[in-house]
Image (cartoon, rainbow, N blue to C red):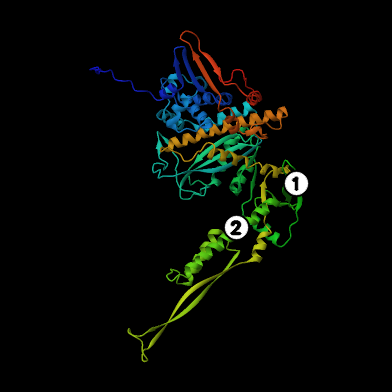
């Protein structure tokens, strides 16, 4: 029988990250084998080093205790790598880092063990206290110079980051003298008006869709009020004012357009539907006073016709005196007609539901005014007032009741009672629908640039969706929402880290595509089964390197022997295109 030691030594508490490190290690009588994941870390490190992200963070973050390990810049760059490769929650950063070779993360083994959610949270606090606009400006300037990114044409747009929860502290209060943002209700672009939000503004280049500037604003901020400050910051970045600034119809206010034009800038935007110029032109369309000239055909790689564009040759200007061009798209015309048809069908369905309620034995619609008000609310909600005509028809029913209770007889007197109910008759005004159809496919562009032709301006406008791709990556690849953070200051800092990740992703994608163009490579077999990929994305590139590993075998006496996963021919080819050595990958 064994007996416990009377004074057993207390076991040391395992540090976070040690369990993951232990799983990477196998010991035997011959030596120790440690295995790490390499994945696409060398690719990301190559881009981040060229960006000098960590150096810029060192320069702009507030001073901290030199004993802090790992340092705040290192912790934030680790978070950028994690967003690009795995998107682990903050409490999982330590275990994620422990699965990778420490030197590829720029850390020591001891620093890896200190990575936890508390360390990452304090790093976000330090980033919040930094001069983020100056940091972003300096980083973007470095990227433009190092990667040769063109700033002749910049595209701006905004999206909303949706939050679920009260966020009672996100009311603009200050943290160490720095104001925080208000997470509140606004015009939600994810069609969730029931949830609170922040406004995320982004500006990207036409050259590769590289993000160069971002801002986060209160959830109830209007896009109209953001353009002047954004344009001024872009002027500082570009070092000049004559670049072409492209944005959606929120830019087309007199104040915004006049400000840019009077300060030597150039802009291109879409004229809103509520402008008098739009109403006048569509009236001319109904009266068949507009002629169109064929501009260009859009085809796919197989030569199939996708769209046809026409332009109105008659010169026009806005009330402010800016150049106004009217275009017609055959594809947009089909889309507009189908959208209007769906609107009308939804309206008729809602009106039929209302009609059934009117005929119920117990209904709250007992007055004609209430019925008309309910119909008007449906038409206004679905924006179909001009296409639907309706009538509220009274229906009188007569009933007879005995004057006194009891069995009726020959002398019983009966009282006649009238009850008025209402029915609803709706029909589609086909003539008004046909009139609206004359404006299908029409869209106006406003600019103060006289030297570009209508075809060139259309090409510039058609590059605006490149920013939608970045928003899509933000919400799908990076899963920016839901945000599992409570403190508004840390949320603001985390959105800044997302911007760094978007920038790195766009630069890596741009480098690969430019290398393919330079080498005359039409496609690469990057899809499953070796199918060709004509426009590779960073997500697909990172996935191809996911299984690369590094193994270190150390004998009792001797230097460790390093072995890495053999790279495939496609992987070696991709590395050469990106200017990396395949011989030392992951070492």
Left or right of 110 in this view: 7: left
Picture residue at 58% right of the left edge, 20% below the top: 585
Say which quarter of the image contains residue 341: bottom right
Q: Position of residue 165 (x, y in %)?
A: 41, 44
Say whether residue 114 is visible: no
Q: Quadrant of the C terminus?
A: top right
Q: Quadrant of the N terminus?
A: top left
Q: Which of disc 2 and disc 1 is earlier in sequence? A: 1
Q: Position of residue 118 (x, y in %)?
A: 40, 29
**10 Å neighbourhood of mark 1: few (<14), some, or many (≥20)?**
few
Query: Which residue is most to the right?
Result: 293
Left or right of 20 in this view: 459: right
Query: Which residue is most to the left?
Result: 6
> Against 253, is 401 above or below?
below
Left or right of 12 in this view: 345: right
**10 Å neighbourhood of mark 2: few (<14), some, or many (≥20)?**
few
Query: Which disc number belongs to residue 399?
Result: none
**Circle 1/circle 2 CB separation < 8 Å:** no
- Judging depth in this view, the residue of 579 and 401 nearest the camera is 401
Question: Is label 1 in a helix, a strand or a loop?
Answer: strand
Check disc 1 and report the residue beneath it: 296
**Dot in front, 1 or 2:** 2
Query: Which residue is most to the top?
Result: 557
- Judging depth in this view, the residue of 293 and 465 nearest the camera is 465
Picture residue at 55% right of the left edge, 43% below the top: 158
Picture residue at 59% right of the left edge, 61% below the top: 344
Question: Is label 2 in a helix, a strand or a loop?
Answer: helix
**Could you give the CA–CA distance between mark 1 and mark 2, rounded to whole angstroms?**
29 Å
Left or right of 249 in this view: 109: left
Check disc 2 and report the residue beneath it: 342
Q: Position of residue 217 (x, y in %)?
A: 49, 41
């Amino acid at each position: 029988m064994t007996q416990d030691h009377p004074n057993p030594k207390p076991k040391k508490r395992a540090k976070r990250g040690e369990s993951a490190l232990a799983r990477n290690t196998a010991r035997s009588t011959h030596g120790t084998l440690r295995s790490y994941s390499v994945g696409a870390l060398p690719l990301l490190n190559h881009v981040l080093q060229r960006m000098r992200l960590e150096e810029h963070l060192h320069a702009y973050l507030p001073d901290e205790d030199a004993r802090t390990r790992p340092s705040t810049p290192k912790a934030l760059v680790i978070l950028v790598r994690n967003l690009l490769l795995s998107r682990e929650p903050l409490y999982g950063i330590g275990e994620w880092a422990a699965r990778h070779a420490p030197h590829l993360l720029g850390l020591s083994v001891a620093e890896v063990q200190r990575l936890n959610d508390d360390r990452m949270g304090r790093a976000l606090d330090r980033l919040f206290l930094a001069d983020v606009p100056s940091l972003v400006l300096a980083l973007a300037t470095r990227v433009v110079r190092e990667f040769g990114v063109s700033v002749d044409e910049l595209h701006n747009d905004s999206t909303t980051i949706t939050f679920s929860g009260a966020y009672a502290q996100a009311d603009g209060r200050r943290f160490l003298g720095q104001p925080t943002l208000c997470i509140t209700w606004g015009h939600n672009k994810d069609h969730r008006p029931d949830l609170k939000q922040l406004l995320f503004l982004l500006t990207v280049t036409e050259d590769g869709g590289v993000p160069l500037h971002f801002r986060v604003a209160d959830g109830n901020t209007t896009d109209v009020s953001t353009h002047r400050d954004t344009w001024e910051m872009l002027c500082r970045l570009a070092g000049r004012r004559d670049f072409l600034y492209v944005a959606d119809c929120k830019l087309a206010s007199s104040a915004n357009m006049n400000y840019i034009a009077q300060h030597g800038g150039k802009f291109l935007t879409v004229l809103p539907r509520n402008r008098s110029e739009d109403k006048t032109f569509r009236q001319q369309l109904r009266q068949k006073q507009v002629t169109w000239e064929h501009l260009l055909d859009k085809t796919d790689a197989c030569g199939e016709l996708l769209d046809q564009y026409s332009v109105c040759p008659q010169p026009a200007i806005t009330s402010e005196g800016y150049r106004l061009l009217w275009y017609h798209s055959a594809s947009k015309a089909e889309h507009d007609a189908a959208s209007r048809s769906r609107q009308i069908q939804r309206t008729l369905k809602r009106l039929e539901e209302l009609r059934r309620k009117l005929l119920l034995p117990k209904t709250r619609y007992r007055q004609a005014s209430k019925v008309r008000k309910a119909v008007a609310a449906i038409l206004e909600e679905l924006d179909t007032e001009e296409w639907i005509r309706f009538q509220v028809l009274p229906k009188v029913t007569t009933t007879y009741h005995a004057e006194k209770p009891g069995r009726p007889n020959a002398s019983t007197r009966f009282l006649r009672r009238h009850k008025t109910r209402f029915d609803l008759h709706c029909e589609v005004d086909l003539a008004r629908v046909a009139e609206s159809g004359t404006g299908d496919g029409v869209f106006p562009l406003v600019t103060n640039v006289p030297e570009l032709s209508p075809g060139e301006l259309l090409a510039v406008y058609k590059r605006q969706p490149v920013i939608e791709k970045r928003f899509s990556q933000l919400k799908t690849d990076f899963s920016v929402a839901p945000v599992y953070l409570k403190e508004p200051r840390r949320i603001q800092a985390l959105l800044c880290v997302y911007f760094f990740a978007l920038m790195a992703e766009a630069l890596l994608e741009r480098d690969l595509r430019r290398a393919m163009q330079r080498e005359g490579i039409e496609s690469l077999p990057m899809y499953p089964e070796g199918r060709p990929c004509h426009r590779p994305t960073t997500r697909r590139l990172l996935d191809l390197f996911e299984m690369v590993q590094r193994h270190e075998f150390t004998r009792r006496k001797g230097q460790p022997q390093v072995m890495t996963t053999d790279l495939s021919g496609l992987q070696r080819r991709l590395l050469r295109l990106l200017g990396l050595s395949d011989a030392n990958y992951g070492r």
